[in-house]
Amino acid sequence: MALIRFVLQSVVEILVLPVTILSYIGIWDPLYKRFFPYLMVKITSAINDKLGKIKKELFDKLPDFASSSGLSILEVGCGSGANFQYYPWGCKVICTDPNPNFERFLKKSIAQNEHVKIARFIVASGEDLSQVASGSVDAVVCTLVLCTVQDIDMVVKEALRVLRPGGAFFFIEHVVADKTTWLHFFQHVIQPAWRYFGDGCCVTRDTWKNLEKANFSELNLKHIIAPFKWSLISCHIIGYGIK
Ligand SMILES: C[S@@+](CC[C@H](N)C(=O)[O-])C[C@H]1O[C@@H](n2cnc3c(N)ncnc32)[C@H](O)[C@@H]1O
């Protein structure tokens, strides 16, 4: 099976060779980063259709972490603002994303979600949130982002830094499937192409291990199968970790 996987993976790598070359010479990534927000807006509405109930249940816990002055949230890799509709009334949100091309889509979401107060949009990667003071937010939200970041441990470390003691890191992330499944096989076969068309997304990460070894005082983490048909990203982890 390992040999078949290697052969199929090599076929995929050959098929995407033109894209690999474009990426290597620095053309693919900047172009794709302009296009990706358009794609994400479409995908987001499909994801919210399927995961809406799960997101609502998770984000209904956000008010538990409000401090006396209200609830402040920092969202890492906010994209087009897919989560705003699930946030509680009156919360203050700092949005961050390294791709500035999301800003116009974000503005649309902000206009549609008047119950949320957007404090600012910072163009920054989750690995470097130095523009945000330590211990300054009640909750950090991160959905479908740890699959793409360069360094998961650094993102979680930064989230823990900006959280106040007792604050929480909320996550919904797709992860690698169980080794014994066909899904695991195809995730590895398709990955060489997927990363280019998913803006660096990796479907083979066991992200729960990073969260389990992070310095949370308490971690509530569940593995779920999202109701996406024929999808490479149906295995998810969902939950929150408390600082
Ligand atoms: C699949 S989209 C998810 C967007 C949004 N969180 C959602 O749930 O719809 C992945 C997002 O992660 C962002 N991203 C990529 N690399 C990142 C990094 N190193 N740190 C933070 N965000 C990153 C992308 O720009 C994009 O907005």
Image (spheres, grey):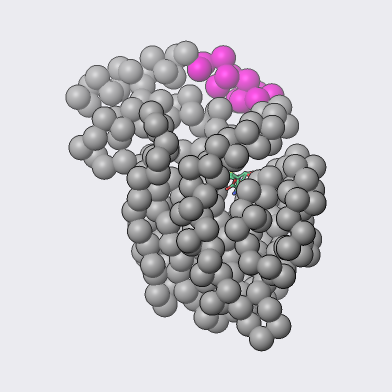
Determine if the magenta segment contains residue 22. Answer: yes
Q: In percent of the image, x 48 and y 61: which residue is there?
A: 57
> Height in image: 159 above or below 64?
above
Query: x, y percentage for residue 147?
Result: 49, 45
The residue under the point 39% across, 31% down is 229
In the depicted view, which residue is nearer to us: 70 or 219? Answer: 70
Q: Is residue 158 visible?
A: no
Magenta segment's dominant SS is helix
Q: Quadrant of residue 23?
A: top right
x 45%, y 69%: residue? 241
The percent coordinates of residue 227 (x first, y second) are 40, 40
**Residue 75 is inside the magenta segment:** no
Q: Which residues are magenta?
A: 16-28
Question: Which image quarter is the N terminus in?
Answer: top left
Residue 231 locus on image (x, y percent): 41, 32
Q: Name the residue at 67% across, 50% down.
A: 81
Tell me if 206 is positioned left or right of 165 in this view: left
Compared to residue 107, the image places residue 46 above or below, namely above
